[in-house]
Every structure is written in C-alpha cells, then in structure tokens.
Image (cartoon, rainbow, N blue to C red):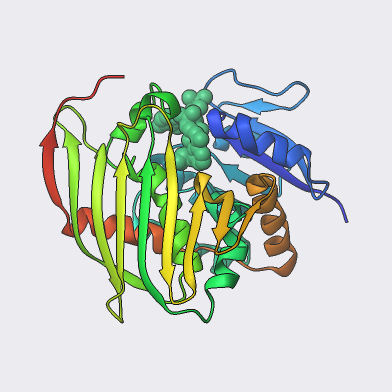
Amino acid sequence: MAPIRVAVVGMGKIAHDQHLPAIAGNPAFTLAATVSRSDSTVDGVPHFRTLQDLLDHGPDVDAVALCTPPQVRYDLARLALDKGLHVFLEKPPGATVAEVDALAAQAGARGVTLFASWHSRHAAGVAPAKAWLAGRRITGVNVIWREDVRVWHPGQDWIWQPGGLGVFDPGINALSIITHILPDPFFLTEAVLDVPENRAAPIAADLHFRDARGTPIHMDLDWRQTGPQSWDIAVETDGGTLQLSQGGAVLALPGETLRNADEEYPGLYARFAELIAQGQSDADARPLTLVADAFLRGTRRTTDAFFD
Ligand code: NAP
C-alpha cells in the first residue's frame, strides 16, 4: 500500500523533536509538506506559509498533523477535514471541548479519520498499568506533576493566554493517563487555581476528584519546580501500590519495576495509521473536559507575576 502523505503544520518544538522522527521511522507515512509561518523547513520537503497555501498550490496530501498551539487548531482541522484529509491533533485537541465534538462530527460526516492524540497514553508503563489495575479495587490516587516552566516552555506566550491551559498543558498529560488506566469515570469536586497577576492561565493547581464509589483522586500541578522534576502517579489498591513515574515511562508494582524504551510518538503514528486503515476516528476529549471543569468549578487565586 502507498504510504500516507502527511503534512506537518506548526513547525515548533514538538514537530521537530517528535513528529518528524516518528514519521521518518514509520514506513506507513511519508512527509509530503511542512506548513509554518516561519522558515522552519525540512531539506527537500515542500514548505508553505499557510495550510490554505498548501491546499491551493502544494502536492497532494492525505493527512495533516496539527502541531500548532491549541487556540488555532480548530480552524486548521475544519479546513483539512473539509478537504477530505485525515487529521492528527496534538494534545490538547482544542481550546474548547465543543470544538473537538464539532470536529468529531465533521470527520464522521466526511468519512475521514480524526485522531485526538494523547502521547502520554503511549508511555511504556501505561498499558501494563491499565492491565494490572483491571479487576483490582482502587482506594485512592495521587498525582504529582511538578516541572519547571522555564525549562520546558521558554518564551511560549500562547501557553499563558486563554486556551493555552497554563500548568494544565503538562497536567492534561497526567489526566490522559488516569482517564485511560482507571476503570471507572471520575469527576471534579474542588480545585484551586493559582494564576500569576500578569498572566491569563494558572501556574499551579490543586485538584480533587472522586469516582462514583467516592474513591479520592488528588492532583498537585505546579510549574515552579526547580531541581528534579516530578511526573508521578500513585494508585493505591487492595493488591498494593502501583507507581508510574517519569511521565509513565517507569512502572513500579509490588515486587517488580518495568522500564522500557520511550515509544510515545512511534506509538501515536502507528495508531493513526491503524485508524486510517480501519476508517475510524479516536477523539476522546475526557482529559480536556476535566480541565474545562477545573476552570468551571475551581477557585482562582491571584499569585506573583511570572516572567520568563
Ligand atoms: P511551539 O514550540 O510554540 O510551536 C508551535 C508552532 O505552531 C510554532 O512553531 C508556530 O510556528 C506555530 N503556530 C501557528 N500559529 C501559531 C500561533 N498563533 N501562535 C504561536 N505559534 C503558532 O509549541 P510546542 O511546544 O511545539 O507545542 C505545540 C503543541 O504540541 C501544543 O499543543 C503542546 O501542548 C503540544 N505538545 C508539546 C510538547 C513539548 O514538549 N513541547 C509535548 C507534547 C505535546 P510558526 O510561527 O512558524 O507558524
């Protein structure tokens, strides 16, 4: 079968760090074009300033991978779906939940694939964690997701603007994991969001959730962490404690620790190819819904101004 001709749109950090290598490493795809307002190009690959320009003047493509900030993703996705292209959305899949639902409906009507990707779900420890938890009684969950925003998001103004999610940009990765591995749905009960006085999005958040049985789920998100970084999830069960660390890469179970190579983006592209082959979409917006609920129900506190 001919490879899927994919265009990468939004040639920033994640496009260069992960999408280009994952596409190059998967024979089901070929990089057909890049789109960015800047001159961030790939040797030998046609480059366009806008998606419309690519659609009007470029080579034929079958799919787009949208690696822009979430605030501009809906219009790009709508345009691509309208042209009958398959669409890979970086996380978070949109700036609002309703726009993701609208895209899913459009993809269904157009008969093409919409893939709302959650890279952390492909971290090495996540699938075995889900399997281990199945059938166990869960008594509590604690998530600590603390990182240094100056290291990971230097100069990214969009991340502090409305729709940029602030500390939920990494925090949603933890939510993507726990919505995937916990057997029961859960919902927010209270949240406190600390928002710098000069920014529109939180720098820290403390969140409490519970499931229908009342199981407590706590999340501590903070972007002011210096030194060692923390991307840890602990799940207490009747069979002992499961610990996912390093963003899901390392899984510790009672009596054993599993540590495998990072396969997040190769896993995402394998899934995208599978969805296209099967004529299906995967647009799970649950992590974004929980973030929206935190903004809806959380208490906002103003905190010190943040400067890069
Ligand atoms: P980034 O480095 O700021 O890159 C975003 C790119 O999108 C920019 O290079 C920019 O390229 C393009 N863009 C188009 N419209 C834009 C606009 N209105 N404002 C700003 N940029 C615009 O961001 P990133 O870190 O790659 O993140 C992009 C997405 O990937 C986010 O949703 C993020 O959550 C997700 N993600 C990031 C990481 C990570 O480690 N950084 C990991 C996983 C997922 P031009 O200016 O050339 O058009």
Residue 290 in percent (x, y) is at 32, 60
Residue 192 point in image, percent of width and height: 17, 50
Choose top left, top right, bottom left or bottom right for residue 69. top left
Residue sitting farthest toward the right = 1
Give the residue displayed 68% in from the left and 47% down from the top.
Answer: 263
Above/below status of 296 relative to 10? below
- The one nearer the camera, 13 or 85, is 13
The residue lying furthest to the front in this view is 255
Q: Is residue 201 left or right of residue 51?
A: left
Side (left or right) of 175 relative to 55 = left
Residue displayed at 83% across by 46% down: 27
Q: Quadrant of residue 255?
A: bottom right
- Which quadrant of the figure has residue 43? top right
Q: Is residue 165 above or below residue 124?
A: above
Is residue 35 visible from the viewing direction of this image?
A: yes
* Residue found at x 79% / y 46%: 26
Q: Is residue 85 visible?
A: no
